[in-house]
Image (cartoon, rainbow, N blue to C red):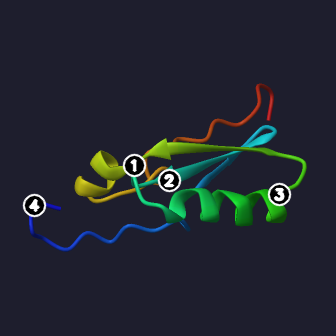
Amino acid sequence: MDGEWVDYSYINHYLCNGGVVLCAFDDPRDEEAAEIFRGLFPDRTVTLVDAREIFAGGGGIHCITQQQPAAGS
């Protein structure tokens, strides 16, 4: 990014109820990665989210999520 190396990775995804939030980078391989994840998680909806700004700050989709336990847990 801006001539500097950025560690873009599809592995930094987030599993949520019925879905997978998958990093995207405006790269032709984004959809290829989504198809792989659809094969890994056939019962979940895979959603690509542009994560370039998040990665520029040093994290990814999974890094910026905060899981909350169910009430009464």
Dot 1 alpha-carbon crowd within 10 angstroms: few under 14, some 14 to 19, many 20 or more: many
For the C terminus, which image quadrant? Answer: top right
The residue at the point 62 percent across, 64 percent down is 32
Pointer 1 or 4: first along the chain: 4
Position of residue 9 measured from the top left corner of the image (x, y, whole percent): 45, 68
Q: Is residue 29 visible?
A: yes
For the N terminus, which image quadrant? Answer: bottom left
Disc 1 vs disc 4: which is toward the camera? 4
Alpha carbons under labels 2 and 3: distance apart: 15 Å
The residue at the point 39 percent across, 52 percent down is 26
The amino acid beneath tag 2 is Cys
Dot 2 alpha-carbon crowd within 10 angstroms: few under 14, some 14 to 19, many 20 or more: many
Please give the label number shown on residue 23: 2
Alpha carbons under labels 1 and 3: distance apart: 21 Å
Dot 3 alpha-carbon crowd within 10 angstroms: few under 14, some 14 to 19, many 20 or more: some
Left or right: where 39 falls relative to 7: right
Residue labelled with disc 4: 2
For the residues bearing labels 2 and 1, Cβ distance under 8 angstroms: yes
Alpha carbons under labels 2 and 1: distance apart: 5 Å
Left or right: where 33 falls relative to 24: right
Pointer 4 or 2: first along the chain: 4
Alpha carbons under labels 4 and 2: distance apart: 19 Å
Q: Residue furthest right?
A: 43
The quarter of the picture where residue 71 lies is top right
Position of residue 14 measured from the top left corner of the image (x, y, whole percent): 61, 51
Residue labelled with disc 3: 41
Alpha carbons under labels 1 and 4: distance apart: 16 Å
